[in-house]
Image (cartoon, grey):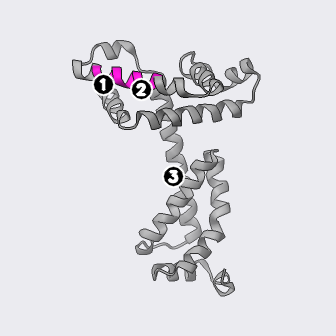
């Protein structure tokens, strides 16, 4: 990295970034990446997700942030990462609730087309669960079908609660990828119940 850039203040680097100066952008990225990662990881402890969140924030800074008035670069980056991490927590929590509690009584009262959609969603969900590794599938089913807490699952399987949390995240991510467009249908069904 250019030692002259490393000596510049955040505001000076930001001014260069506004002029599409890539080395200045790289300097900002290197200056803040590890701190932002730690911040995100405290909120949402998943390495891949945190890295993606931070990359998204920097991408936004490069694409649109150059046209945004930013008084404090450090504050802007921290707030952006914190908000995205909190949004990710909310999204995961909503997905956990949604996948774990589709009531069969509600499904039976839906119109014929919606029933077909639900049957297809259930089939894909069952296939996705069956594709999971044994340990991951067991933990996910204990969580979603037996409604056990992470601590209860950890105690029964003699593993760390963090392992339970990680396995649930892996399982739900796989299911979410498999359901794809059907998640939109599922969300629309939920909003009409």
Is residue 190 toward the left or the right of residue 88 in the image?
left
How far from the left and from the top, in percent, is residue 140? 58, 25
Q: Which residue is mark 1?
A: 117
**For mark 2, does the 10 Å Cα neighbourhood hold few (<14), some (14 to 19), or many (20 or more) residues?**
some
Give the farthest residue toward the right.
Answer: 158
| CA gap, disc 2 and disc 3 | 29 Å
**For mark 1, does the 10 Å Cα neighbourhood hold few (<14), some (14 to 19), or many (20 or more) residues?**
some
Q: Quadrant of the N terminus?
A: bottom right
Give the main secondary structure of the magenta stretch.
Answer: helix
Q: Is residue 125 magenta?
A: yes
* Mark found first going from the N terminus, 1 or 2: 1
Toward the viewer: 19 or 123?
Answer: 123
| CA gap, disc 1 and disc 3 | 31 Å
Quarter of the view holding residue 142: top right
Q: Which residue is mark 3?
A: 84
Name the residue: 22% across, 18% down. 112
In the displayed structure, 120 sits above or below 177; it is above
**For mark 3, does the 10 Å Cα neighbourhood hold few (<14), some (14 to 19), or many (20 or more) residues?**
many
Is residue 29 toward the left or the right of residue 104 in the image?
right
Q: Which residues are drawn in magenta?
A: 116-126
Q: Is residue 10 magenta?
A: no
The answer to whether marks 1 and 3 mark residues whose Cβ atoms lie closer than 8 Å is: no
Toward the viewer: 125 or 40?
Answer: 125
Q: Which residue is mark 2?
A: 124
In the displayed structure, 16 sits above or below 37; it is below
* Mark found first going from the N terminus, 1 or 3: 3
How far from the left and from the top, in percent, is residue 82? 56, 54
């Amino acid at each position: 990295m250019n030692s002259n850039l490393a000596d510049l203040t955040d505001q000076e680097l930001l001014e260069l970034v506004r002029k599409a100066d890539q080395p200045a952008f790289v300097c900002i990225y290197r200056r803040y990446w590890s701190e932002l990662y730690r911040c995100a990881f405290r909120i949402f402890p998943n390495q891949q997700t945190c890295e993606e969140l931070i990359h998204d924030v920097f991408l936004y800074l490069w694409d649109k942030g150059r046209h945004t008035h930013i008084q404090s670069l450090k504050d802007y980056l921290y707030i952006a990462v914190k908000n995205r991490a909190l949004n990710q927590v909310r999204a995961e929590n909503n997905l956990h609730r949604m996948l774990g509690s589709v009531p069969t009584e509600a499904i039976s009262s839906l119109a014929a087309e919606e029933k077909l959609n639900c049957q297809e969603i259930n089939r894909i969900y069952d296939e996705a669960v069956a594709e999971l590794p044994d340990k991951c599938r067991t933990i996910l089913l204990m969580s979603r079908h037996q409604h056990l807490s992470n601590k209860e699952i950890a105690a029964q399987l003699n593993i760390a609660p963090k392992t339970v949390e990680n396995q649930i995240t892996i399982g739900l991510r796989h299911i979410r990828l498999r359901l794809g467009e059907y998640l939109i249908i599922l969300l629309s069904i939920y909003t009409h119940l």
